[in-house]
Image (cartoon, helix red, strand yellow):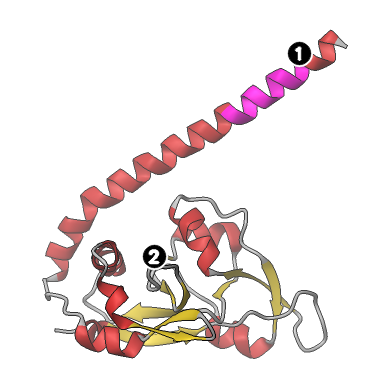
Amino acid sequence: MKLADIIETFISGDWGEETVAEDTPNSVFCIRGADIVPITNHCFNGIPQRFVCDKTIENKTLKAGDLIIEKSGGSPTQSTGRIVYVSEDLIKAKDNVVCSNFCTAFRVKTGWNPLYVYYYWQNMYNHGAFFNFEGKTSGIKNLQLDNALSAIEIEYLPLENQNQIVAPLIAIDEKIKVNRQINDNLLLLDHSSRGAIVRLAA
């Protein structure tokens, strides 16, 4: 079975406009390639706010469980094809979320756990699979997504087995998320304490 066989639908990107206007009255947060690593690290603060038309809100707003792929970008040592999972936490934090034009999103078919697909894709990416499906336009690397999806195989497993594989990986990610939140809180506390010491010294 190929990756192409498990995708229900694609959701194209929309960069929108910087300011609200009559034609683009809807506020969204637009995920770029640059946001993939922070979102993976459970940091949502840097996602830019944009404004889009009603049609984009209707057809391109992402849901929890969607997967976003970086189509353009990369570097000599980093291929295109990075992936990020749209989590419930992200939707709760940002409400209306879309991806940018340099990305595309997709939803998997019934019978597939999107997190299983996410971890599988991430593993393929880490092993350099997507270097084989790149072209260049004006010096920018572009992922030949259709070719990649038609070529890369994924083994079908019953949903119960997929869930069993995903469960420990989710637990690890949750621990990383909690540790990062603790570190962030400690940094804030440290800065506050230093500020109080400076004020007292003054």
Q: Is residue 53 shown left or right of residue 92?
A: right
Q: Nearer the viewer, residue 125 or 163?
A: 125
The answer to which of marks 2 and 1 sits earlier in the sequence is 2
Q: Is residue 151 shown left or right of residue 85?
A: left
Quarter of image, res 18: bottom right
Residue topped by disc 1: 197
As helix, strand or loop, the secondary structure at mark 2 comes to loop
Residue at far top of view = 201
Q: At 39% across and 68% down in the image, what residue appears?
A: 82
Residue topped by disc 2: 78
Q: Is residue 114 above or below residue 202?
A: below
Q: At 69% across and 67% down in the image, what residue appears?
A: 49
Residue 57 part of the magenta-drawn span: no
Name the dominant secondary structure of the magenta segment: helix
Q: Quadrant of the C terminus?
A: top right
As helix, strand or loop, the secondary structure at mark 1 comes to helix
Q: At 37% across and 79% down in the image, what residue appears?
A: 107
Q: CA distance from mark 2 to mark 1?
A: 44 Å
Please give the range of residues in magenta. Answer: 187-196
Residue 195 part of the magenta-drawn span: yes
